[in-house]
Image (cartoon, grey):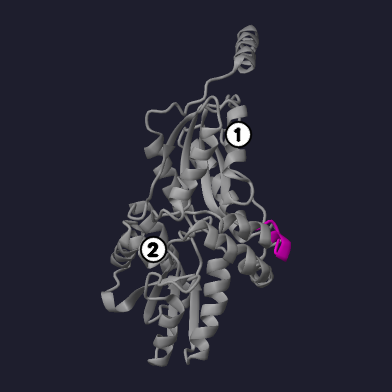
Amino acid sequence: MSFSPEPPFVHGTLPMASSGTAILLCNLGTPEAPTAPALRRYLAEFLSDPRVVEIPRLLWWLILHGIILRTRPKKSAAKYASIWMAEGSPLKVWTQKQAVMLRGYLARRGHIVEVRYAMRYGNPSIASQLSQLKVEGTTRILILPCYPQYSATTTASVFDAVYCWAARARWIPEFRFINHYHDAPGYINALADKIRTHWRHHGQAEQLVMSFHGVPERTLKLGDPYHCECQKTARLLAEELGLPKDRYKVTFQSRFGKAKWLQPYTEPTLIKLAQAGMQRVDVVCPGFTGDCLETLEEIGMEARDAFLKAGGKEFHYIECLNDSPQWIAALADFSVQHLAGWPTQAQPDHQTLAASRAAAVALGAKQ
C-alpha cells in the first residue's frame, strides 16, 4: 500500500515557513521485523516498563529474562509474520499514514503544523522525534496518544517518555497533552460509520462484540479510569448505532500472565455465544485506532477459530479506524481544540519574502 500526503497549500501559492508548532502522534510500538531477535528487543523494552508490569522489579527481571525472553520471541514472531504487510508492521503503517493525513487535513483548515509519529517502544522513538523537532526549531509540541481511553499502562507511559526526554534537555519546548477522547463525538461517529459500512456490505449479526485491550483488574481498584472509559465508549457507540443492551457485549482481550484481568474475557465470551447457539457475531475493537497484531491476529484469526470450533457459523471482524476520512477529521478536531492559543499560521521566511517582493516588482513592471 502506498500513499501520499494531501498538499498543504493551494497550487500556486508561495511556500511558507514552519509555524514552530508540531503534533507528535504516539502509538504503542512494534518490532522492526517479524523475527525472533527483533521480537526479543521489542519485548525487552516493552515488558521492562514499570507502567506495563507493576510487580517488584527484581522478581519481574528474573521472570522476564529467565523465562519470557527465552520462549516468547519465537512464538510472537510467527504471529507477526502472519499479519506483516509489504510496507512493514500494520500498526506502524497505519500510524504513519494517519500522521501524514492529519497534517494535510489541518493544512486545509489553515493550520500549518508539523505532524510526526512516534512509538513508545521501538522506532521511531518518542525521544528521537522530540530531538529532531527541537533541531528543526519547533517550540510548541502537542502530544497526541493513539489511545482513546486513558490508562496508566498506555497514555501515562507515553507521557513518562516525554518527561524523561525533557529531564535531559537544557531547553524544553512548550508541551500540551491529550489525555483521552473516549467520548468525543467525532471518535464515536467515526466508529459508528465503520460499523454501518460493514453492515451495508455484509449484513448485521445478532450480536456485536466490542473487544477492548485488557489490563489487570487491580488497575481499576488503584484508580485507573480505563475500565469506566471503555464502558462509556461502548454505551455511546451502541446509542449511536441504535443497539439495545441485549444486542452488544463489552469484553477485554490480550490477557497476559495468571493475574485476574478485566472481565469478561473476549475469547471465552465468543465460545459461550457459539455454544449457546449464536450463529454469527460481529467483532469490533474500539480501543485500537489502527489495525495491529491484537486485532488482525488475536481477533481476526485466533478468536475467529475459537468461535467457529465452538459451533459458530459466521464470524466477522470489523476493521479499525485506520485511514477513515471521518477518523482523520476527528483527529483534526481534537488537535485544533488543544492547539487553541498557539500560533499555527506560518509566516514567510526571508527567502519567501524576497521572492514575493521580486514577483510584485515584476508584475508591476509588466503592467
Q: Nearer the viewer, mark 1 or mark 2?
A: 1
- 239 sits to left or right of 340: left
Look at mark 2 in the image and give the residue it sits on.
Answer: 192
Total marks placed: 2
Q: Position of residue 198 (x, y in %)?
A: 46, 70
- Residue 33 forms part of the magenta stretch: yes
Q: Quadrant of the N terminus?
A: bottom right
Secondary structure at badge 2 equals: helix
Quarter-of-image position of residue 116: top right
Q: Position of residue 364 (x, y in %)?
A: 60, 8
Secondary structure at badge 1 equals: helix
- Residue 313 forms part of the magenta stretch: no
Vertical side of 345 occupied by 253: above or below: below
Q: Is residue 311 visible?
A: yes
Look at mark 1 in the image and give the residue it sits on.
Answer: 131
Task: Give me the residue at 37% from left, 39% from top.
Answer: 337
Task: Give me the residue at 48% from left, 91% from top.
Answer: 310
**Residue 22 circle label:** none
Task: Give me the residue at 40% from left, 78% from top.
Answer: 204
The amino acid type of the residue labelled 1 equals: Ser
Q: Position of residue 82 (x, y in %)?
A: 66, 71
Magenta range is 31-38
Quarter-of-image position of residue 269: bottom left
Q: Nearer the viewer, residue 34 or 274?
A: 34
Q: Is residue 200 visible?
A: no
Q: Position of residue 223 (x, y in %)?
A: 31, 56
Vertical side of 187 occupied by 356: above or below: above
The amino acid type of the residue labelled 2 equals: Ala
Considering the whole magenta stretch, tell me its main secondary structure. loop
